[in-house]
Image (tube, helix red, strand yellow):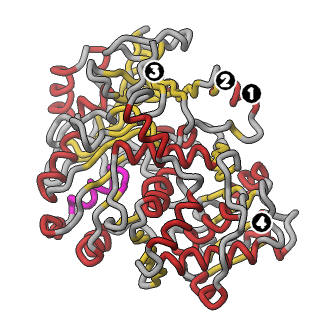
Amino acid sequence: MTAAVGSAGPVSAVVAASVPLSVVHLLVDAAQQAPDQCAIEFEGACLTWAQYAGVVGALAHQLSSRVRPGDRVALVMQNSLDLAVATFAVHALRAQAVPLNPRFTAQELQALLADADPIMVLHDDSVNFDPGLVCPLLPPQAIRATAGGAGFMALLESIRELPATLPSHDDLATLQYTGGTTGRSKGVNILHRHLAWNLAQREAWLPTRAGAEVVLCVMPLFHVSAVAMSLHLAVAARSKLVIHRRFDPQAVIAAIEEQGVTLMSAAPAVFHDLLLQEQLVRLLRSRLRACYSGAAPLPRELLARFEEVTGCPIYEGYGMSEGGPCLTYNPVSRERKPGSVGLPVPASEFQIVDLATGSRELAAGEAGEIRVRGPHVMAGYRNLPELTARTLRDGWLYTGDVARRDEDGYVFILGRRDDVINVSGFKVYPGEVERALLSHPEVGEAAAFGVPDERAGRAVHAWVTPAPGTKPDEIMLRRHCEKLLAGYKVPRRIGIAERLPRTSVGKLARNELAAVPNKSNEGGQGR
């Protein structure tokens, strides 16, 4: 039996009927339907839909002398109007965009660029070294710079129509490098089919209002989730996108008020930091109607406090670069379950299978590995055929994430398969421990992990951050865990930290967690 919510039936039929030809076709449609409506704004620079499409066309025309269908173009830029324009221009040429973190060092970028082998590199002035040094095989004219974040606004003087032949579902769209928190960063080959289907799947669970939204982007657009839930979502909704260069709590609150923001996607750390701002109460009078959370578990207390203060619901989901990226979400039209990442998106197959064989589907309540299958699943990893073969088996994407489902089909993430802590032969999933800690009102964030132990093999340690205005202590938190967890799952040490280590997209950097000292109030504030 395939436990697939919406893999057949009326919802999936609606999804299939609403799949666009490509994200570039959506831009063309928006320019035709609402040419004079503001489409994108960045630090005072604004483009209407007609201008947006025209500037994308102009840049595509300039790049076309060097870039051909199937080529790869690296985009090393921070959040900006320029990055949005460049992404669509590369797509319009039926080339593959390779978004890279501009904060990477020259050494980090050199490794990724060697793997991607791009025909061209576009970068902005946030890169603090000469990109030509990390691309020695590219001629100087294949490395193009833009400055200020809105340098492509100059193309308004020479706007052009988009190419006559736009992308098809079978064209490569993006080479997305994973965060590399579990080892080598891998290049995920994403087709336009995957982007198109996943947009329609997301829309089924989180419907937008055509022409009536204002989408705020504060997460980095070199990451697949921000592209899906901000850049592409805004074009699909034919609605204004407001881009922030980086996350700043006070700037976010001001934008929500002044720009009339209705939708925002962010990591839990963003909602946590917003709650520390006294001005947040002003959002009660705003038009913000929905927030989307991903990248890391959303603590129940954080969700409850944010919704109490702002009156705005947060819809939590789960995904990965290899899967579209949206794999599950708490739907707007159904029950939201705190602590759950929701239901699998329609028109997909979603199973939780045993860890030993990966083929036996488990019953509700049993923990196993998530595997998914559908039109939103990646084509494979670049230059990694053996890993691709292990990850994609019989059409199933084996995610490496361990989860369980309840009787209603809602998914609860327990952690990465590789993060399982073996305590005297018993398996402990970090997510279980973290949820127990996060259920205490004085805990803001939590991270559980294993450390070597002479007697048990591994022991559970954890770091937590205090909820605003609280001062939790280790003894109190251990007693709290003892009420909720079996003895071997209770952390032996719990440290109190000012912050937890995060990647650039808000994911917990588990490889940076240090063992908690014997006395949690000694040895610094943890990493």
- How far is mark 4 from mark 1, CA to CA? 28 Å
For label 1, count other residues whose C-alpha is less than 10 Å away and answer few (under 14), some (14-19) or many (20+): few
Q: Do the residues labelled 4 and 2 touch (CB within 8 Å)?
A: no
Residue that carries the numbered disc 3 in the rendered image: 351
The three-letter amino acid code for the residue at tag 4 is Met
The three-letter amino acid code for the residue at tag 3 is Gln
Q: Do the residues labelled 3 and 1 touch (CB within 8 Å)?
A: no
Residue that carries the numbered disc 1 in the rendered image: 386
Decide which of tag 3 and tag 4 comes sooner along the chain.
4
Decide whether residue 271 is among the magenta residues: yes
Q: Give the range drawn in magenta.
A: 265-276
The three-letter amino acid code for the residue at tag 1 is Glu
User: In the figure, is residue 128 to the left or right of 370?
Assistant: right
Determine the main secondary structure of the stretch shown in magenta.
helix
- x, y percentage for residue 17? 48, 43
The three-letter amino acid code for the residue at tag 2 is Arg
Please state which of the two labelled residues, at mark 3 or mark 4, is closer to the viewer.
3
Please state which of the two labelled residues, at mark 3 or mark 2, is closer to the viewer.
3
Residue that carries the numbered disc 4 in the rendered image: 120
Per the image, label 3 sits on a secondary structure element best described as strand
- How far is mark 4 from mark 2, CA to CA? 31 Å
- How far is mark 3 from mark 2, CA to CA? 17 Å
Q: Image quarter for residue 522?
A: top left
Residue appearing at x 47%, y 49% in the figure: 199
Decide which of tag 3 and tag 1 comes sooner along the chain.
3
